[in-house]
Image: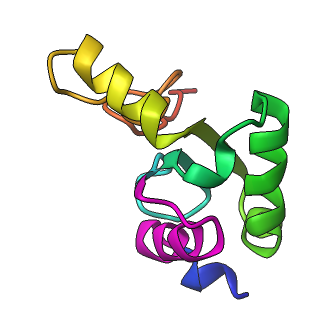
Amino acid sequence: MSESTITEASLKAALTERLHAVHVEVTDMSGGCGQSFTSLIVSPDFAGKNSLKRHRAVNAALRDEIAAIHAWSAKCQTPEEWERDKKENDGAAEGPPLDGTVGGHVQGVDA
């Protein structure tokens, strides 16, 4: 897969298809250059798997894409966990992890 074809939409489509995801949010944190992504993936395939096994499944599903980008992070939930979190947050689901970003984008450092 060419680096230029890796986008929020292409990653979302791949995750939805390969992991049977019922909900996927992907955020390009690199300001649009396609080198740093974070995601929320909700899939029934995660049921009965611990966090490590879930992340291994995601990494295997996106092996070629992850090899072509600089940074990747994912929050993996079952549909039940996602619904529970939405109820705990008054109907608003917590999206992908955005730690270390400003508004979901990595900011440069003035030298």
**Which residue range is magenta in the image?**
7-24
Q: Is residue 35 magenta?
A: no
Residue 64 or residue 51, whichever sits in front: 51
Image-based side of 52 in relation to 7, left or right: right
The image quarter containing residue 55 is top right
In percent of the image, x 74 and y 36: which residue is there?
Answer: 48
In the displayed structure, does residue 20 sit left or right of residue 102? Answer: right
User: Residue 8: within the magenta?
Assistant: yes
Q: How many marks?
A: 0
Residue at 56% x, 67% y: name it: 20
Height in image: 34 above or below 83?
below
* Image point (84%, 62%), residue name: 60
Question: Could you tell me which quadrant the C terminus lies in?
Answer: top right
Left or right, 85 with reference to 13:
left
The rendered magenta stretch, by its main secondary structure, is classed as helix
Q: Residue at the spot x=75%, y=42% of the render? A: 54
Residue 75 placement (x, y as % from top left): 57, 35
- Residue 102 placement (x, y as % from top left): 37, 27
Residue 106: x %, y % from top left: 49, 36
The answer to whether residue 93 is above or below residue 41 is above
In-front residue for pair 38/48:
48
Name the quarter where the N terminus is drawn.
bottom right
In the image, 83 versus 76, the foreground residue is 83
Q: Is 90 placed above or below 10 here?
A: above
44 up-or-down from 3: above or below: above
The residue lying furthest to the left in this view is 90
